[in-house]
Image: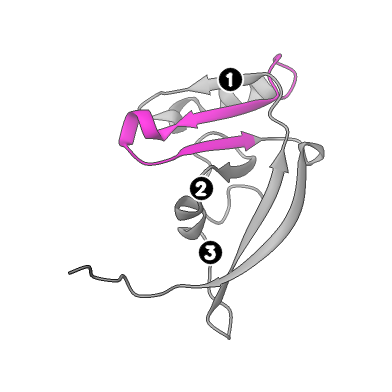
Amino acid sequence: RAGSATGSLFGRGLYFAESCMKADEYAAQDSRGLCPLLLSRVVLGRVNYCDAKEPALIADSLEASCKGGGFHSVIGDREKIRGTYREFVVFDNEQVYPEYVVWYRRMPPFKSG
């Protein structure tokens, strides 16, 4: 069920990010120590832009706006509000085409100098 594992800040939908760093926050390593990253094409359509400081308080209305309310997706602008990354949320899996699975291994940070 959507939102049951990590929450549903902008509603119970499919979440995407423009940064692999954001995606890595949710990736779990497998037995080989590899993490999957799903590279997808997502059709946003008419976007409901959200820069609310506490979007969880309006999550139901954001979701409803995309389920018959005239919008097709939500952009949660966490970059503007929290200095992190924007999130893209759709509520219809027909808007998503998972194109590649990229497997990667997390490495310790490299120190310069």
Q: Which quarter of the figure is the C terminus placed in?
A: bottom left
State the extent of the magenta-drawn residues as a range: 67-89
Q: Which mark is residue 27?
A: 3
| Amino acid type assigned to the residue bearing label 2 in the image | Gly
Q: Is residue 73 magenta?
A: yes
Q: Residue furthest top?
A: 70
Q: Residue at x 49, y 25 (%)?
A: 58
Of labels 2 and 3, the one closer to you: 3
Q: Residues within 10 Å of mark 2 (few under 14, many from 20)?
A: few
Q: Residues within 10 Å of mark 3 (few under 14, many from 20)?
A: some
State left or right for residue 21 relative to residue 81. right
Q: Which residue is mark 1?
A: 48
How many discs appear? 3
Taking depth in this image into account, of 5 and 98 the one nearest to the observer is 98
Q: Residue at x 68, y 29 (%)?
A: 44
Question: Distance between the Cα atoms at labels 2 and 3?
Answer: 15 Å
> Along the polypeptide, which appears first: circle 1 or circle 3?
3
Q: Residue at x 53, y 21 (%)?
A: 49
Question: Distance between the Cα atoms at labels 1 and 2?
Answer: 19 Å
| Amino acid type assigned to the residue bearing label 1 in the image | Asn
> Along the polypeptide, which appears first: circle 1 or circle 2?
2
Q: Which residue is mark 2?
A: 7
For the residue labelled by badge 2, is the local secondary structure a helix, a strand or a loop? loop
Find residue 70 and report its image quarter: top right
